[in-house]
Image (tube, rainbow, N blue to C red):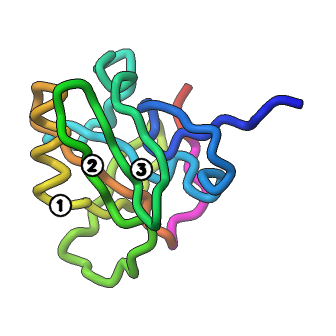
Amino acid sequence: MTASVYQPIAECGTTEQSQAADYHRRWLIANDAGTWLNRELCPRLAEIAVELRMGYLVMKAPGMLRLDIPLDVIEDDDSVRRQILLGDQTVDVVDEGDLASAWVSNFLGIPSRVLKVHPEMGEVRWPV
């Protein structure tokens, strides 16, 4: 029997943790222009390891301290709500804030944001 593989942050590392099924591709990383970053545009995304631990999405990368982002937050602050274009679909997202932005920007070497797909967003059609 083969374990399932999940990717909580699209295009970043994977995990076989069963609880990650509910969080598969819940987050993504975009540049400061709002363009979704995939491994083709930014190969270093593959170096960001992720795991779920005690209610947090834990991000690790070479040369970086780990970053913990709460998994389940009530998304009621419209000031952090954005829209991003993924392929031909407009997706509602929530910005995870300046600390997460600084962490990912520092690692990738380009201004970037960590975005969470809004829980009220329907199915996301991820470009291939």
In this orientation, does residue 72 appear? yes
Residue 44 rendering spot, x and y as whole percentages: 29, 20
Residue 125 rendering spot, x and y as whole percentages: 58, 43
Q: CA distance from mark 3 to mark 1?
A: 13 Å
The answer to the question of whether label 3 and label 2 lie on touching residues, with beta carbons closer than 8 A, is yes
Crowd around label 1: few <14 · some 14–19 · many ≥20 (10 Å): few
Quadrant into which the N terminus falls: top right
Q: Which residue occupies 56% across, 38% down? A: 15
Question: Does 45 lie within the magenta span?
Answer: no
Q: Report which residue position mark 2 lands on.
A: 114
Q: Which residue occupies 64% across, 39% down? A: 16
Residue 32, numbered circle? none
Q: Which residue occupies 19% across, 41% down? A: 65
In this rendering, would 3 be left or right of 113? right
Residue 122 rendering spot, x and y as whole percentages: 58, 63
Q: Secondary structure at mark 3?
A: strand
The answer to the question of whether label 2 and label 1 lie on touching residues, with beta carbons closer than 8 A, is yes
Vertical position of residue 110 compared to residue 60: above or below: above
Q: Report which residue position mark 1 lands on.
A: 97
In this rendering, would 34 be left or right of 52? left
Q: Amino acid at mark 1?
A: Gly
Q: Magenta part of the protein: which range?
A: 120-125
**What secondary structure prevails in the magenta region?**
loop
Q: Report which residue position mark 3 lands on.
A: 27
Quadrant into which the C terminus falls: top right
In this orientation, does residue 33 appear? no
Question: Does 122 lie within the magenta span?
Answer: yes
Could you say which quadrant of the image residue 40 lies in? Answer: top left
Q: Amino acid at mark 3?
A: Trp
Q: Amino acid at mark 2?
A: Val
Q: Which residue occupies 55% across, 55% down? A: 23
Residue 8 rendering spot, x and y as whole percentages: 50, 46
